[in-house]
Image (tube, rainbow, N blue to C red):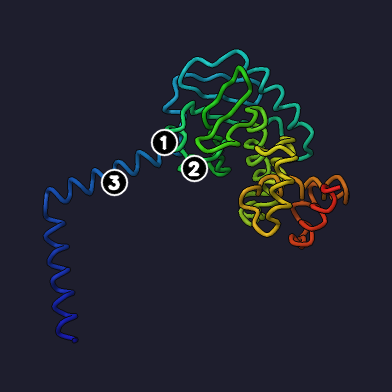
Amino acid sequence: MKNFLTSGIEAYRGYRSFAKRSKTYRAVNYSLTAIASAYCLLLLFPQLLFAHQISHKNFEVYTREPVSENIYSLLDAAEAKLLRSPIYKPEMKERLILTESFGLYKFLTVKGNSMGSTIPIVGHSRINRTDIDNDLVFRNSEPPNQRSLSGVIVHETMHNQIAEHLGFYRYMRTPAWKDEGYCEYVAGETTLSFDEGLRRWKGSPNDSSRYDYFKNHQMVKYLLEEEKVTVEELFTRSFDVADLAKKTLAHIDL
């Protein structure tokens, strides 16, 4: 067995030595490295793919085609909601990438079934296919597959704002239900209507995969509005999530 292993190791070393000397191997290796590096660069700086940019207040919006003038009223509506949050910093620059297609959105996020995606450490918010004139965002999935663009802008912006408020380390340790739930709370909406979200929750109380964001939104809303928890306490206190879910469902199912 020992001689067999030794021979195998020597054979592998010989292959590696040959591969390193091979021009074809080196060319393929360099090409793959270059492609991977270029992709990572686009993930960090996706605005390189977008020819048009507008600035409005603390928002920078990047698009491939000239953007509709209606974008300004949508940004104003989003800001009005954001200003209600005590942790929102209106001086903080927010960069919005309107991908305008399902394919490009998936390429830049690897999350083709979502409305938007934000990586706080990078700071850019990518948003799926939009209809600015009708204040809509679409995702490439079965219905419900649309919601308001202004609401998605609020939601994605709040991810950056929460990370800025908590600091990156604390933000990464924050449970998703708090993070996503508060973003939806500030936006004032989810993809599901209230009636549909409640129906799904009651129908499958032990599996929230089909109404997760609705549930998170309602739990955060219950804490802030009914139990009078402050936003700071929301992110610093520990909660019994199972008990909170039961109390929230009982409260909204009246």
Which residue is painted at 14% across and 73% down in the image?
A: 10
Question: Could you tell me residue 132's position as x and y percent?
Answer: 59, 20
Q: Residues within 10 Å of mark 2 (few under 14, many from 20)?
A: some
Vertical relation: 15 (above or below) 125: below
Q: Nearer the viewer, mark 2 or mark 3?
A: 2
Dot 2 lies on which element?
loop
Instruction: Give the residue type that dot 1 points to.
Output: Leu
Cβ atoms under marks 1 and 3 closer than 8 Å: no
Question: In the visual, does 61 lie left or right of 108?
Answer: right
Q: Which residue is mark 3?
A: 33
Cβ atoms under marks 2 and 3 closer than 8 Å: no
Instruction: Give the residue type that dot 2 points to.
Output: Lys
| Front residue of 228 and 206 | 206
Question: Could you tell me residue 206's position as x and y percent?
Answer: 68, 60
Which residue is painted at 55% across and 43% down in the image?
A: 119
For the residues labelled 1 and 2, the Cα–Cα distance comes to 15 Å
Q: Which residue is mark 1?
A: 42
Identity of the residue furthest to the bottom in this view: 1
Dot 3 lies on which element?
helix
Q: Which residue is mark 2?
A: 111
Cβ atoms under marks 1 and 2 closer than 8 Å: no
Question: Could you tell me residue 217's position as x and y percent?
Answer: 73, 45
Q: Residues within 10 Å of mark 1 (few under 14, many from 20)?
A: some
The image quarter containing residue 11 is bottom left
